[in-house]
């Protein structure tokens, strides 16, 4: 409920394996207190929004087993607290940005 009623206070967002579809909304970037994001094992597609780079409190991001495409945005380099980023089983291409 916290993420819905007071997004700025949201620290944990997990919707693992619930057949979410569509693209990741850029509005995820407004969840500035988020430390854990798990949207793995869904049907998410499209590219990673550069706004994810504003989640500077993020420690762990799990987006594996989706249908994400494109390259990693360089803005993810701002996630200096990030200790785990799980992106396997997607259709991402290219190299890791030097900022990471």
Image (cartoon, rainbow, N blue to C red):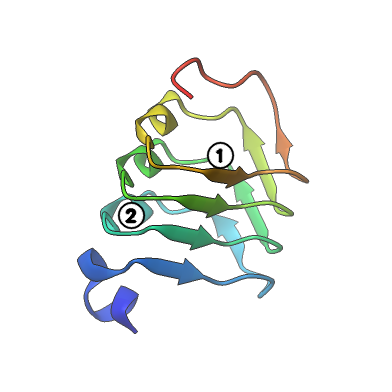
Question: Could you tell me which residue is drawn at 58 percent across and 58 percent down?
Answer: 22
Q: Which residue is mark 1?
A: 47
Question: Could you tell me which residue is drawn at 74 percent across and 43 percent down?
Answer: 88
Placement of 33 over or under 75, stated as above or below:
below
Question: Could you tell me which residue is drawn at 62 percent across and 68 percent down?
Answer: 20
Secondary structure of the residue carrying numbered label 1: loop
Q: Residue furthest right?
A: 89
Q: Residue furthest top?
A: 98
How crowded pointer 2 is (Cα within 10 Å; few <14, some 14-19, many 20+) is rated as few
The location of residue 59, given as percent across then percent down, is 44, 50
Question: Could you tell me which residue is drawn at 34 percent across and 66 percent down?
Answer: 11
Q: Quadrant of residue 56?
A: top left
The location of residue 61, given as percent across then percent down, is 53, 51
Q: Which residue is mark 2?
A: 27
First in sequence: mark 2 vs mark 1: 2
Q: Quadrant of residue 41?
A: bottom right
Placement of 30 over or under 90, stated as above or below:
below
Closer-to-camera residue (52/85): 85
Q: How many marks?
A: 2
How crowded pointer 1 is (Cα within 10 Å; few <14, some 14-19, many 20+) is rated as some
Placement of 65 over or under 80, stated as above or below:
below
- Describe residue 70's horizontal placement relative to residue 50 as left or right: right
């Amino acid at each position: 409920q916290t993420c819905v009623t007071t997004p700025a206070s949201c620290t944990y967002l997990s919707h693992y394996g619930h057949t979410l579809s569509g693209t990741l909304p850029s509005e995820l970037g407004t969840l500035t207190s988020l430390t854990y994001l798990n949207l793995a094992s869904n049907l998410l597609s499209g590219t990673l929004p550069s706004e994810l780079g504003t989640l500077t409190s993020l420690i762990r991001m799990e987006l594996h087993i989706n249908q994400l495409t494109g390259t990693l945005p360089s803005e993810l380099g701002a996630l200096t607290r990030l200790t785990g980023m799980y992106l396997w089983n997607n259709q991402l291409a290219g190299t890791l940005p030097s900022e990471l």
